[in-house]
Image (tube, grey):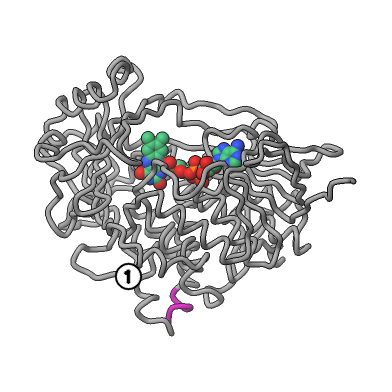
Amino acid sequence: MPVEREEFDVVVVGGGPGGATLAALVAMQGHRVLVLEKETFPRYQIGESLLPSTIHGVCKMIGVTDALAAAGFTHKKGGTFRWGAKPEPWTFSFSVSPKIASSTSYAYQVERSKFDKILLDNAVSKGAEVRFRTQVSDVIEEDGRVVGVTYSGEDGAEHRAYARFVVDASGNGSRIYKRVGGTRVYSEFFRSLALFGYFEGGRRLPAPYSGNILSVAFNSGWFWYIPLSDTLTSVGAVVRRENAEKVQGDPEASLSALIDECPLIKDYLSGATRVTEGQYGQIRARKDYSYHHTTFWRPGFVLIGDAACFVDPVFSSGVHLATYSALLASRSINSALAGLVGEEEAFTEFEARYRREYGVFYEFLMSFYDMHRDEDSYFWSAKKVTHSGHTELESFVELVAGVSSSEFALRDAESAAVRMKDKSAEFAAAIDELAADREGNMAPLFKSSAVRQAMQEGAQVQSRAFLGEDLGPDVPMFPGGLVTSNDGLFWLPAKA
Ligand code: FAD
């Protein structure tokens, strides 16, 4: 008897934040979505420090705001760094000022096993089907187009699922990303290794920053110190390639020796014990995690999240890039399935915006590593142009957060639409002001027009989540490009 051909509109490979976000956004349009996930959730994953744009932008769009709030994750108001020439740690806050209450000036530090399950459960509640313990081994091609995948299930047999679009959201260990064509290019600049474990009873930063990520540079690289609960802390050393021998051999001894090298982290962990059981009981290592693929799509097939690219974790951009690329790709899929724009146009827009966003973080991080050696950084420039009494980094965030988080709009919904329509121009002006100091010299971060553009797009994602249809007409990001629909779920041709 012939086996019935299983058909879907979209097959998503991998149920991490990228896959779960895309599945929800496409299923919300009534399309048939199948997610194939090789693990059973909850499962462990690294990448615990999130950004406000994920929490208040994309997560709001997919409808998980209440579930995330109920999960009791640590509130992250910003970051605290022992970095650069100054010996004392310095802090930045997502809010314009730490004293001003704002409903969007925080993110979460999450246990990824819990966070990822919330997002995947949400995709199911929006209509997606999820199959756990199913491992995708290849894509199926017909006439030059990807039309499905082969996968093995719990029965050990090979199965096939067909779809109009296949999305590779299976992370950095993807088995199918090469089928998009092109190559994965590893970064020469960010060639670090990470060694990480979990501790109970570590110290906390003083209030109100006890939920901040603490990043501490030391001779061999830098440490992250992420408070996941009142007592549980994620601690990881990112070690430069030339110090690779320090993370080889016994992981326990290596992590311990690195902690001994870094007095601030050693002090914070002085009364703590390492977790040795359960999902946090292992010391794990990662390497070669900074790369980008040279193409992100081909007919019928698209890469999102870590399957496409990732860069050094110092500014916690991974989950942001995964969920943001899921939003961009879902717009392309939803628009193509609805016949609003052609596939080529839709995915060209996806790739251009995603590549630019990745490029922004890449450039941002290179400047930040430059700052490690050069005190005359962009934070100093920000302080000079704003004449702020706050720290350098707070001065920087004051300008950026004022545009990206639309706190006024939230407090005053009626005038929000009017304010938001002028947002792009205000933002560009604010960034241009920040970009140059009084002598007209450009700070390194802002030399790139891509940086300015991407910050503007970040502002729009958050604003649309809050204001929906009140935001006003969009303008193309690239000449001849597409615009976003008012609800943020589709691409549309720009009006002539
Ligand atoms: P993943 O989260 O990797 O999800 C992919 C899913 O696909 C998994 O569930 C996997 O089981 C499944 N899968 C894989 N292969 C198959 C297959 N063949 N068939 C079916 N399913 C499959 N990001 C942050 O935002 N903040 C941080 O603080 C941070 N710190 C980091 C520290 C380090 C050292 C590293 C290396 C990364 C860090 N990241 C951080 C990045 C973050 O881990 C990733 O960017 C993020 O998890 C990517 O999400 P994703 O959905 O693309 O993929």
- Work out whether residue 51 or residue 23 is closer to the camera in this orientation and state it: 23
Secondary structure beneath dot 1 equals loop
Say above or below: 56 vs 250: below
* Residue 225 on the magenta segment: no
Residue type pointed to by label 1 = Ser
Q: Nearer the viewer, residue 278 or 36?
A: 278
Specify whether residue 337 is in view. Answer: yes
Residue beneath the point at 26% across and 45% down: 226
Q: Residue at x 59, y 71 (%)?
A: 486
Q: Main secondary structure of the magenta part?
A: helix
Q: Pointer 1: residues within 10 angstroms few (<14), some, or many (20+)?
A: few
Image quadrant of residue 395? bottom left
Quadrant of the rendered image containing residue 103: bottom left
Q: Which residues are magenta?
A: 415-419
User: In the rendered view, would you say 98 is above or below 254?
Assistant: below
Q: Residue at left 60%, top 61%?
A: 25
Q: Residue at x 56, y 76 (%)?
A: 469
**Along the horizontal axis of the image, is 461 left or right of 100?**
right
Query: Would residue 358 be visible to someone looking at this image?
Result: no
Residue 376 image position (x, y, % from top left)? 23, 37
Q: Quadrant of residue 84?
A: top left
Q: Name the quadrant of the C terminus.
A: bottom right
Q: Is residue 245 above or below residue 256?
A: above
In the rendering, at what x and y percent does residue 102 appear? 29, 69
Task: Count up the numbered dots.
Answer: 1
Is residue 416 on the magenta stretch?
yes
Q: Which residue is mark 1?
A: 103
73 left or right of 170 in image: left
Q: Where is residue 251 drawn, in percent x and y?
A: 29, 23
163 sits to left or right of 193: right
